[in-house]
Amino acid sequence: MAWFKKAVSTDHTKTGASGLWATCPGCSRTLRDRDPATNLRVCPSCGHHLRLDGAARLRTLLDDGLWTEHDAGLTSTDPLKFTDRTPYPTRLEAAEATTGLRDAVITATGAIDGLVVEAAAMEFGFMGGSLGVVGAEKITRAAERALQYRRPLLIICASSGARMMEGTLSLVQMAKVSAALGRLDRARVPYVTVLTDPTTGAVAASLAMLADVTIAEPGARIGFVGPRVIERVGGHPPRGFQRSESLLEHGMVDMVVDRRELTSTLARLLRFLDASSVIRKPLAGPVETPVVGDATRTERPPSLDLSLD
């Protein structure tokens, strides 16, 4: 059986922070919020990168802000009948009402500098961007589309890790997604990740670090567990621990790129990687043309088995 179901539509209009102003955590300057077109939510005074929601990530990276969305109707059920202070279905409903999404991952086909790519963007506002059965299924399908059509795969990570309300079912998604990415690697299909603040837990321990090229935004927190957890077990993390710049210094990421330079950097990088791949024609079927971001496609490659038994 499959532990998710299909819903009818997706509305991205609610995605993002509320209010017209934001305070920069780096220098306390008051900034205009919800205006990514001006400075991509990067503080002009200190360069601090405020968080962007998943849909805004796609709008700012893909050509003309256009894409074809896939599998928007997939939504979690409650396989474990999980309840702590609030039942899991109630939490899902609240997250959907806040973000306008069915789950924490948006997958899409779009283009960067004219090169068609498969992309996935994580939405931290949906239950901390946690990776569950649905999010992993969507990423796996994106990887399979990239393999089928031999397109580069781009994943923008923003996650607190595995979704604990789905227990072990969420943890095994690390292996599922990693296996799909392994098939891309063996076929020499390019895979790039962009690690944003935060990228932690099971996501950091799997798909975030498996790319051909790993890019991080300045100041992003990246690591398996947070510093407070480490301190509680007697550790004393050094200054800058788990930040992008520290990971770059220790060889854990390949480059740290300012958000305002990210699109041009990805365009050059993906062109280089695409030219290095062995074959460019699709394995089967036509190449779709990206359309506006709210278009939804829910079909899957014929080879995909939805059974999790």
Image: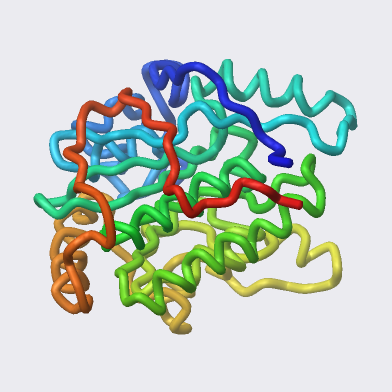
Name the one closer to the observer, 195 or 300.
Answer: 300
Residue 235 left/right relative to 279: right
Q: Quadrant of residue 54?
A: top left
Q: Position of residue 153 (x, y in %)?
A: 34, 59
Q: Quadrant of residue 261?
A: bottom left
Q: Position of residue 115 (x, y in %)?
A: 14, 54
Give the vertical position of 52 relative to 278 (above or below). Answer: above
Q: Residue at x 58, y 16 (%)?
A: 97
Residue 202 left/right relative to 27: right
Residue 177 left/right relative to 85: left
Q: Residue at x 37, y 33 (%)?
A: 55
Colouring used for the render: rainbow
Q: Position of residue 95 (x, y in %)?
A: 62, 24
Q: Residue at x 56, y 47 (%)?
A: 137
Q: Position of residue 4 (x, y in %)?
A: 66, 34
Give the vertical position of 215 relative to 300 (above or below). Answer: below
Quadrant housing the N terminus: top right
Outermost residue to the bottom: 250
